[in-house]
Amino acid sequence: MNEKTAEMVGIILGDGHLHNKSNLITIVGSLEDLDYYDKRVIPLMQNIFKKTPTLRRRNDRNAYYLMLYCKNSMDYLVNQIKMKRGAKTNASIPKIVTLNKKFIKSFLRGLFDTDGCLKFSKQTSNLNYYPRVQIALRDSPLAQELGYLFDYLGFRYGKWKEDRFNGIIFYQISGKKNTERWFKEISPQNPVHTSKYEFWQKFGYYIPKSSLAFRKQSLTQKFYK
């Protein structure tokens, strides 16, 4: 077990799936996740599993699929890491992930990069300036256990369940200092999230529904007086 493996466990528990019968590991993300897959997830899988996954775009679902067929990799995740195959309704945080702070932070990085989001509300302003780190999970042991990791690291958070969203459990870490601490200590790697954070840091607000391409362009553009 190391930090890279802990991050991969978070990625799989976020947007991944261990097939119930075949030795197939799948990770599914949006079209804007392409850079994240190319520069982060695929190198991690190559390092951990010594195999290169297949990357496919599914236009019918506007998504990218990463797929790895490998018995040894599946055996490692199930028998040594103690992850569960099939639906994630019974998913939990493997105990080996909680051995130290570095593993926990790496795990949270993978989970947030795939299943989290950075939101901004207006509060009393006309601009969306108030940051909120959010992770939403289907009710499961994993969803219930996540709060213990935040407690251990000293992150203050809100937690609630939305029955109208089929019982989704939401965790939210709010405010400027908490968000800055999250990005410093957890160090997310998905450009979808980091570009939002950098845009907010540079301009002091966020533009809802802006694209990754727009944020990248805005961050590199020079303004002259």
Image: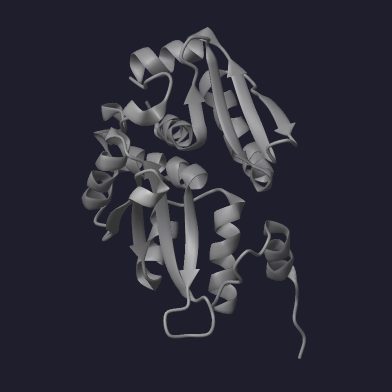
Residue 155 at x, y = what percent? 28, 58
Residue 4 at x, y = what percent? 46, 33
Camera-side residue of 204 and 85? 85
**Residue beneath the point at 47% across and 44% down:** 115
**Residue beneath the point at 28% across and 59% down:** 157
**Which quadrant of the view contains residue 101?**
top left
Extreme bottom residue here? 225
**Residue beneath the point at 72% across and 64% down:** 214
**Which quadrant of the view contains residue 25?**
top right
**Which quadrant of the view contains residue 111?**
top left
Residue 51 at x, y = what percent? 61, 18
* In the rendered image, the vertical position of residue 190 relative to residue 58, given as above or below: below
Q: Is residue 74 left or right of residue 52?
A: left
Camera-side residue of 99 and 33? 33
Count up the numbered dots: 0
Question: Does the rendering let one see residue 91?
Answer: no
